[in-house]
Amino acid sequence: MSDDCVTIVEISIGPLEAADRADTVIQWLVDTGVVVPNRQRDEVWQPSAYRPGPDVHKAAPSWQETDYTLANNGVDVVVERQLYHSVEAYQAPSCPTCGHPLDESTHEGLMTPWLDGTEPQVRCPACDAVHPLGDWPGSFQVGELAVSFHNWPPLADDFLASLGARMGPRWRVVHEHY
């Protein structure tokens, strides 16, 4: 069996703001009924801090009642600087201006400075445009605040927009399949 995870990560805020915003995000998720605290956590079956709530359809309209019984279908809010990527086959990010792909070794070399705290500004070798690495479609993302939805059906666009707005100005969606 394989798992899917959709992570919404905010890439532009620092650790203190991330901690403050995490409290706001958690309260909003609970208040809307999308999640409830997971009072029966189990490291294998349900390891997440939150589980789907009574109004889960607000976030995932195609949620089926049988989805409640899946292993590891919870939600985690992460307040820690981490790298997020799709885990699947690597595909180089492309320039937001012209679509030219970034060289794989160049892309990988930019991850360490970003993890250390500075998002690189990347010049496209084809069109000479400069963009922050997090704006290059397909790039890995680094952030201090993330919300991960494990084994959920697709999330509604309006829900993602509302969640992202609470997280910060530069939120990104990362799909993982492992």
Image (cartoon, grey):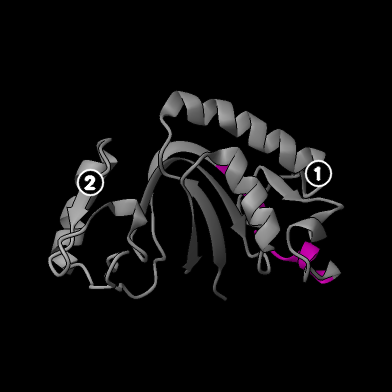
- Is 85 displayed left or right of 61 in the figure? left
140 relative to 178, above or below: above
- Is 162 displayed left or right of 63 in the figure? left
- In the image, which is nearer the foreground, mark 2 or mark 1? 2
Residue labelled with disc 2:
120
Location of residue 19 in the rendering, given as x and y in whole percent from the top left corner: 53, 27
Location of residue 103 in the rendering, given as x and y in whole percent from the top left corner: 16, 68
The stretch in magenta equals 66-77
Residue 109, quarter of picture? bottom left
Residue type pointed to by label 1: Thr
Residue type pointed to by label 2: Pro
**Near-viewer residue (125 or 149):** 125
Tag 2–tag 1 contact (CB < 8 Å): no
Whole-angstrom CA distance, mark 2 to mark 1, is: 36 Å
Per the image, is 71 magenta?
yes
Q: Residues within 10 Å of mark 1 (few under 14, many from 20)?
A: some
Q: Residue at x 46, y 46 (%)?
A: 170
Q: Residue at x 54, y 73 (%)?
A: 2
Residue 39, quarter of picture? top right
**Residue 32, label in figure:** 1
Location of residue 92 in the rendering, given as x and y in whole percent from the top left corner: 26, 70
